[in-house]
Image (cartoon, rainbow, N blue to C red):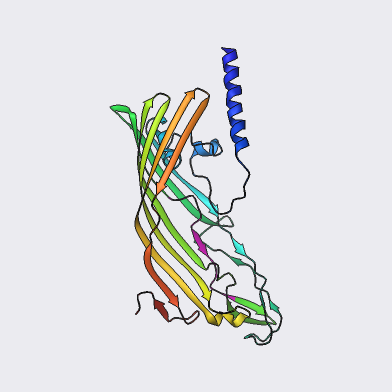
Amino acid sequence: MRSRHFTDILFSLFLVAAAAALVAPAARAGFEYGVQGAETVARSGANSARTTGPEALYLNVAGIAAGDGLEFLIDANFLNAALEADLYGNRVDGWSPVGVTDVIDYPLVHNSTDIYAGGFKMFPAPFAGVTFPIPRWKKLTLGFGVFGPAALGDFQFPKMMTIEYGGSSYELPGPQRYDLISETVLFMWPTVAAAFRVTERLALGLAFQWGVLHLKFSQAVNNGSVTTPGSYRNDMLATFDGWDAFIPAGMVGLRWTPFDRLEMGFSARFSDGPKAKGEMLVVAAPYGDDPIYSNDP
């Protein structure tokens, strides 16, 4: 018995080392974070094969078949959204609305979201789910949940800001305006799932998701060369506000435990692409109050 136990441990360590060796290091960018759940956090993200609670609705739907009766999960991540941009400024040669001929340094611009706590600008990302076996057929487990993508979905940078130069104050547009002024994304997935325990060591799962998307963003574009603080006179501010009330998606999952110290999982998710429809608002007179709508003839 001791010899078999030791062999199982060595075999498991070999599989882990082999998997790690196959993963090439890569730089990743973006704002994706790990999903919620105590089991997910405790396993440091190694959860596709072992997660059994409602968070399996996001990770591997087959996992709910191994759950322990009725389980609830109400959770949230709070992201520090204190992003900032620091631009060099505008070099002015000759004419300038502020009458200078050198570099005007913009101050730092910050993202500001609606929730502020503990000195951090916070973005909440809630997750709620419930899973339970069917009383008279305990090999079948059902799950219901509502959650969003694991990403930051709210940015708000200043449209205008005050620049101090030469003892005077000037109102100029934010330096980050050609990248982003504001963005609000509401993307949620109501989910219905079922998992069936084929044997004590094998489970299969299916899930259907009804995605709902509301996207609103605003940025500036310029039809000329941006060389002076006055170049913003050629800016156009564009805001898009659109909805897609039905983005179908599905997930299939498999969970297999060939022996007691090895758990394996497979999960695949398929989704239609967002087709948000809405209205584009363009302010042709820069930073003014005379908008042009996309449906305006």
Viewer-side residue, 116 vs 51: 51
Residue 55 visible to the viewer: no
- In the image, 217: left or right of 279? right
Across and down, in percent, residue 248 comes to: 35, 50
Please provide percent x and percent y for residue 100.
69, 84
Task: Name the image quarter holding residue 216.
Answer: bottom left
Foreground residue among 253 and 139: 253
Magenta stretch, residue numbers? 148-161
> Residue 120's image quarter?
bottom right
Q: In the image, what residue occupies the spot 54% across and 63% down?
A: 112
Q: Position of residue 176 (x, y in %)?
A: 58, 69
Q: Is residue 114 above or below residue 255?
A: below
| Direction from residue 137 to residue 237 in the image, left or right | right
Instruction: Verify whether residue 155 appears in magenta.
Output: yes
**Residue at (58% x, 81% y) in the render:** 231
Q: Main secondary structure of the magenta part?
A: loop
Residue 291 in magenta? no
Residue 96 picture quarter: bottom right
State whether residue 94 is above or below residue 103: below
Q: Is residue 280 visible?
A: yes
Examine the rendered structure and indicate whether residue 139 appears above or below residue 3: below
| Residue at image location 41% in from the left, 71% down from the top | 280
